[in-house]
Image (cartoon, helix red, strand yellow):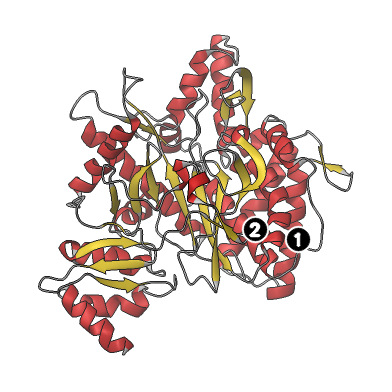
Amino acid sequence: MSVRRVMGIETEYGISVPGDPTANPMILSGQVVNAYASAQGIRAAHASWDYADEAPLRDARGFDMARGVADPSQLTDEEDPTLANVVLTNGARLYVDHAHPEYSSPEVTSPRAAVAYDRAGELIMAESVRRLSQVPPGVNLYKNNTDGKGQSYGTHENYLMRRETPFTEIVRHLVPFFVTRQVFTGSGRVGIGMDSRKAGFQLSQRSDFFEVEVGLETTLKRPIINTRDEPHAVADLYRRLHVIIGDANHCDVANLLKLGTTSLVLAMIEDRAIDLDLTVARPVATLQKISHDPSCAELIELRDGSTTTAVQLQWRYRELAERYLQERYAGEVDADTAEVMHWWGVVLDKLERDPSGAAREVDWVGKQQVMQGYIDRDGLEWSDPRLRAIDIQWSDVRADKGIFHKLRRAGRFEELVTDEQVHEAVHEPPADTRAYFRGKCLEKYPDQIAAASWDSVIFDIPGQPSLQRVPMLEPLRGTRASVGALLDRSPDAETLLRELASASG
């Protein structure tokens, strides 16, 4: 395998009302979703989410958590009629999750596509903010992971894996990788500790909020490896690795590396190609130690008693990947894999020489340089509340307010996808996954769809006595190549379903 696999990113956005810190975030988040949905002609009563196949309490370790002991935040399979929840024509889900508006990208098959659809989510949220601003005081949204006051919200990744891969091997090889990858995936944060009580700057917005190595929860006792076993696909063949330890990235290179390097490590795990024990001693404490070290020079201890730096451990993963690709493909890899390997080496080399050299590619480095500029110019200390305000403003989704967006337009960051590609991703689904069928059905037959989910579309055909479900358990079916012509020649959903039944039967 290469970096190509079915993958996607879920991003919860920070939310606030100017001048009103007591505003209800759940109500505000619903307004955000509905503002965008109504502008696109999507009604809350249509194209809602289908919860039938959700199983958030199923654990990859072989059991189901009892509902009676689960935290309410884990019960994501229970529909709340008071919350907005819609499916978009690009195949994504836009909804309210734990008092935050969340954009869950459609399934894609490459890290570059994941970057484009993640950035499309930023434009969707910015459009909601623009529409809500017409009724003061409006709402502000931030693509970040903490409010700086003790609350954290997630940016999650999803990767389709072979079910046959032992979960113990996934844990063994992913924990050290996740603990150290923050050197290039961290988005940077002013303040140390969950409530930012200690002054300073760190690599990751999420690291201080993790407490255990392995677990099912996502909002409490956060684990480095999340064990939720909810594949949204043929369960006998696939598992969905649900990764909750990532930051919300703005930099294209960092986002590409987050998805691409993880996918490569997963390929090596699936093919039993990692023959080194890179287990880190005290993973949670080490995770936080690395985050608190912008020099990237602190030594960390491995279980075998040896020491290394986070960057050096990432080099070892890259060397393993290089050997794996050479042995499997004789070095002749696809363009997506070549791109990830290129940037992985470039960024690690810069971080090892002098982290400041990676400011164009890595979020935390670019942010730290801006913060240091304010410190030098105004004589500030890291404890100054103005720096925390700048940290928040960095991630503002508004193009004219967000510091990152201003610097991006000024050419301060390396860009891998164009604005045109991102704008297209706002409305058009990926052509090479089942998201194509989902998104095009929403576009073409909006009034004849009752609900949808990752693995189904449910139609409500006039005159029919019951709803009709089209299952989509194979993520690489329902592509433009397989159903594009069928959709083009079906003027209504009834014709589409009749032809689908004929083809299958």
Which SS class for mark 2?
helix
Q: Position of residue 501 (x, y in %)?
A: 27, 84
| Residue that lies at the very extreme toward the right in this rendered image | 305
Q: Residue at x 47, y 22 (%)?
A: 390
Q: Position of residue 6 (x, y in %)?
A: 50, 65
Q: Nearer the viewer, residue 148 or 415?
A: 148
Q: Position of residue 304 (x, y in %)?
A: 88, 48
Whether residue 134 is situated above or below residue 102 in the rendered picture: above
Q: Residue at x 77, y 53 (%)?
A: 316
Query: Pointer 2: what residue?
Result: 341
**Mark 2 nearby-residue class (10 Å; few <14, some 14–19, many ≥20):** many
Relative side of 293 to 481, left or right: right
| Residue that lies at the very extreme toward the bottom in this rendered image | 505
Relative side of 61 to 393, left or right: right
Q: Image quadrant of residue 384?
A: top right
Q: Residue at x 34, y 31 (%)?
A: 25
Relative side of 383 to 48, left or right: right
The amino acid pointed to by label 1 is Leu
Location of the N terminus (image quadrant): bottom right
Q: Is residue 417 visible?
A: no
Name which of mark 1 and mark 2 comes first in the sequence.
Answer: 1
Whether residue 238 is situated above or below residue 181 in the rendered picture: below
